[in-house]
Amino acid sequence: MRIKGGDPSALRRRNLATMLSNVYEHGAQTVTELARSTGLSRPTCEEGVVELVAQGWAAETAPPDPTAARQPGRPAKRYEFNADAGRVLGVDVGAHKILTMVADLRGAVTAVRRTDVDPALPAKERLAAMGDAVTACLASEPSADHSPLLAAVIASPGIIDAEGRVVLSNPLPELTGLNLADELARILGPGRVDGPIRAENDMRLAALAEQWRGVAAGVPDLVYIHAGHRMGAAVLIDGKPYRGRRGAAGEIGTLGLLDWANSYRRLLSYVPDSTTGDATLRVFTDLREGNARAREFVDSFARDLATGVAVMSMTIDPTLVVVGGGISRAGDDIIEPVRQHLIDLCLFPPEVKASSLGDESVALGAVRNGLQQMEARLFGPIPSSP
């Protein structure tokens, strides 16, 4: 997926990419404004916008305020990036659900499909459920017949290598060894995606979503902590998910020294014989009513959580720590005790906030990653001729 030049020259295609990138980032512009902001000549911009409109990447748009006073004569045409030139697909394959989203090239979600699944579902059935969800989501998308998929990203728990293979997944062991990118490509069929198909760790994409549309909007460096039935972390540095050598960066939930998994079980034990999130709802409800036992359980969990946050924070020194997962629904009832424990644990305690995206964060992160893939291919360096 590239901008096509009207002639074979790399310079021509580079100029087109420069113009399109400018309206993508800064919004609709006239040819005069585009020439000024890009440094290209007016004739180059005049020819360029005509070509970009013909290719479908740009579209003519109405003046910003047609009722405002203006100079006599015909108003100058304005051109904007065409968000309907394509779509991106994001898929979250989790233990309890499969959530699929389609979005336009501005990130506006145009179709959603959610399927609840059994955590014990075998790999074959889970992939079949994923295929059904993807197919149904794409079929419900309004532009399914004429707007091509320019990127597709699938997310799942575990360590996933650069090729999309699940190296290890403790939450979903049946996926270990599978190449999720290949599985998604198989489901979509040959030629369905005019661009990359990628697979990535779910927490890493949840962190990306928080930076895109959550409480970490605009924050360059952050640590994302997933707290719930599964405990883990992810890191963003300079706005990019950090994978590490083997894709295992942030997998501190497996560190026995932290004992995170048992920490959550101990919180659940507030309600005897409970193994569900109902126990967490009860403990925080009782906490708000002043129950001393509930306060003790929450404080114990917050201390354990803060220990892991401190380990990550003193290593990365992030601008912000975002707590996601099921526990984030408790809001300040869990965030405040974590903050208090961090005062004793960290030289410079980080700011901590609860996620605002709920269980859509991973799918949204997959969409955002797909948009980044699109941006890199559309606006990136023009390959040299052989």
Image (spheres, grey):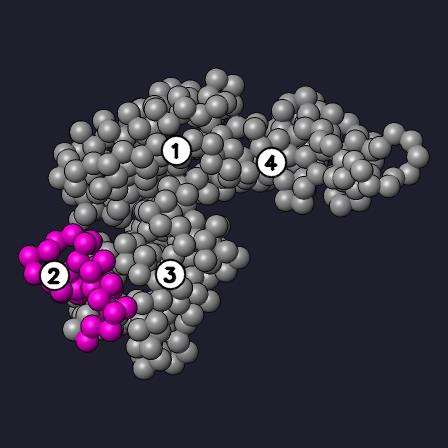
Residue 10 seen: no
Q: Amino acid at mark 2?
A: Val
Q: Who's the residue at 24% across and 29% down the image?
A: 129
Q: Who's the residue at 68% across and 21% down the image?
A: 54
- Element type where label 3 sits in the image: strand
Q: Amino acid at mark 1?
A: Val
From the viewer's perspective, is the residue at label 1 or at label 2 nearer? 2
Cα–Cα span, label 2 and label 3: 24 Å
Cα–Cα span, label 1 and label 2: 35 Å
Callout 2 environment at 10 Å: few (<14), some (14 to 19), or many (20+)?
some
Residue 265 in which image quadrant: bottom left
From the viewer's perspective, is the residue at label 4 or at label 2 nearer? 2
Q: Is residue 273 above or below residue 312?
A: above
Q: Who's the residue at 15% across and 35% down the image?
A: 121
| Highlighted magenta segment, given as a residue range | 263-292
Circle number at residue 354: 3
Q: Amino acid at mark 4?
A: Ile
Q: Earlier in the sequence, mark 1 or mark 2?
A: 1
Q: Are marks 1 and 3 in contact (CB under 8 Å)?
A: no
Inspect the magenta stretch and tell me whether residue 247 lies in it.
Answer: no
Task: From the image, tell me which residue sits under label 4.
Answer: 382
Circle number at residue 112: 1
Q: Earlier in the sequence, mark 1 or mark 4?
A: 1
For the C terminus, the image quarter is: top right
Q: Amino acid at mark 3?
A: Ala
Work out which residue is located at the far front of the displayed protein and give it: 289
Q: Are marks 4 and 2 in contact (CB under 8 Å)?
A: no
Inspect the magenta stretch and tell me whether residue 278 lies in it.
Answer: yes
Q: Earlier in the sequence, mark 4 or mark 3?
A: 3
Callout 1 environment at 10 Å: few (<14), some (14 to 19), or many (20+)?
many
Q: Are marks 1 and 2 in contact (CB under 8 Å)?
A: no
Residue 367 in which image quadrant: top left
